[in-house]
Amino acid sequence: AREINLRLFGLHQKLFIEPNPIPAKWALQQMGMISGALRLPLVPLTEAAQPAVAEAMRAAGIAVSAQLCVVEARALIASLKRLVLRWQ
């Protein structure tokens, strides 16, 4: 049990990066377990938080969908653009 808890600890922390259950539902969607449809008052997980939850899922050994790679690529491109603007 301790080994499993240690493996999942980072994910448990990131699942509260935004109001619950938004990150948990996003993670389940990335695993293909639920659709992406949300009912109000829930809103989608912000693009800024998605890479952190995705990395925690990977660290916990949880597979994520290819769609997530697109989201992470967009976040990486945005970060690179900010860096380039700082250097100019």
Image: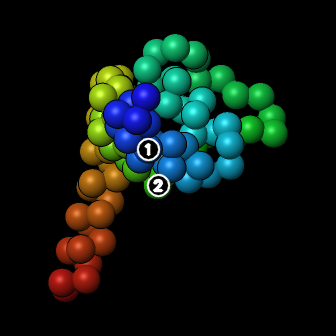
Q: How many marks?
A: 2
Mark 2: secondary structure:
loop
Amino acid type at mark 2:
Ala
Q: Is residue 74 left or right of residue 87?
A: right
Whole-percent x, y for residue 55 in the image: 33, 43
| Residue named by callout 2 | 48
Task: Answer with the quarter of the image where residue 4 lies.
Answer: top left
- When the figure is inspected, residue 45 is found, relative to residue 79, above or below; the finding is above
Q: Is residue 71 visible?
A: no
- When the figure is inspected, residue 45 is found, relative to residue 32, above or below; the finding is below
Residue at coordinates 46% horizontally, 55% vertically from top-left?
48
Q: Earlier in the sequence, mark 2 or mark 1?
A: 1
The residue lying toward the viewer, choosing from 77 and 31, is 31
What is the basis of the colouring in this image? rainbow
The quadrant of the picture occupied by the C terminus is: bottom left
- Structural crowding at the residue carrying mark 1, measured as other residues with C-alpha within 10 Å and reported as few (<14), some (14–19) or many (≥20): some
The residue lying toward the viewer, choosing from 77 and 33, is 33
| Residue named by callout 1 | 9
